[in-house]
Image (spheres, rainbow, N blue to C red):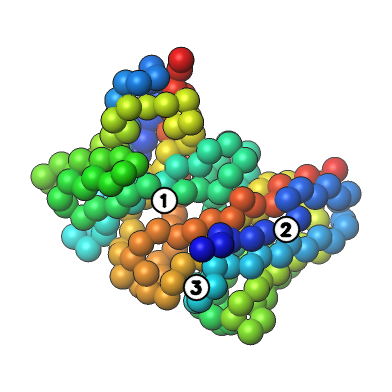
Amino acid sequence: DAKTTQPTSMDCAEGRAANLPCNHSTISGNEYVYWYRQIHSQGPQYIIHGLKNNETNEMASLIITEDRKSSTLILPHATLRDTAVYYCIVRVKPGNTPLVFGKGTRLSVIA
Amino acid sequence: EAGVAQSPRYKIIEKRQSVAFWCNPISGHATLYWYQQILGQGPKLLIQFQNNGVVDDSQLPKDRFSAERLKGVDSTLKIQPAKLEDSAVYLCASSPSGSGNGYTFGSGTRLTVV
C-alpha cells in the first residue's frame, strides 16, 4: 500500500506557482521522497527526489518539512503542459525496491 | 539515449483470447518492471526482473499472466485467457541496477477486453 496521502485534484492558473502537498507521516529514516508525474497517454516521468534537504532542479523544487512528515512539490511557473497526475512516493533509495504508486493528485493548469 | 520501447500501442481482444506485450528497456538497464494501470488508479507492480531472473512476482495473477525476460534484455508479458477486468494500460519500466534515481517508463500498451 502507498505510504503517502495527496489531495485528489488541484487547479492552478497558468504562470502561477503550483504547490502540491504530500503527507508521509510514517516515513522511515532511510526512505526518500520521490515525485513523478504522468501526462495523459504517457508513462510516469521522474521529477525530483530528496531525503531531508530541499532540492531544486530544472523542473521543480521539493520542500521537505524538518520532521520529514510532509513535503511540497513546487512548479514555479505552471504551464498548460504541466497538466498531469502527480505522484508522491516514499522509497528506500539504494537497491531495486519498486515504486509503489497511490492515486496521486490531478493538477489542472488553467489558461 | 533511446527510451523504453513498448508494443503494440493499443490492443483490443475478446475475453478468453490471449495477448502478448513486448518491452525493450534502455540499453544496459539490468532491472525491468511491468506495471498494470487501471483507469483512474496509479500503476500497480506486476513483476520485477533483475537481468533475466524474477525478483518479485507476488502480485502477478499467475493463473493467467506470465512474463519472461530472455537474455536479460527484452521482455514479454502474456495474458491467457483474458478477462474483462484485465482492461488496463500495461507499462514497462527499466532502471540501472541498484540505481537510487528514477525509473524510465515506456508509453504503455492500452488493452481493451470486450
- Is A92 placed above or below B41 here? below
Marks 2 and 1: in contact by CB < 8 Å? Answer: no
Looking at the image, tell me whether mark 2 or mark 3 is earlier in sequence order: 2
Q: In the rendering, which numbered label is found on residue B46?
A: none
Residue A69 seen: no
The chain that hosts pointer 1 is A
SS state under label 3: loop
Q: Is residue B5 left or right of A33 when viewed as pictured?
A: right
- Is A73 placed above or below A16 here? below
- Is A10 placed above or below B4 here? above
Q: Are marks 2 and 3 on the same chain?
A: yes
Q: In the rendering, which numbered label is found on residue B29?
A: 3
- Give the residue at mark 1: A46
Location of residue B23 by image quarter? bottom right
| Residue occupying image coordinates x 88% and y 57% | B17
Q: Is residue A14 left or right of A58 when viewed as pictured?
A: right
Q: Are marks 1 and 2 on the same chain?
A: no
The disc labelled 2 sits on which kind of residue?
Ser
Given residues A63 and A75, the one toward you in this image is A75
The disc labelled 3 sits on which kind of residue?
His
Given residues B29 and B67, the one toward you in this image is B29
Q: Position of residue B31 (x, y in %)?
A: 50, 72
Q: Position of residue A39 (x, y in %)?
A: 53, 38
- Give the residue at mark 2: B7
- Is B45 placed above or below A59 here? below
Given residues A62 and A59, the one toward you in this image is A59
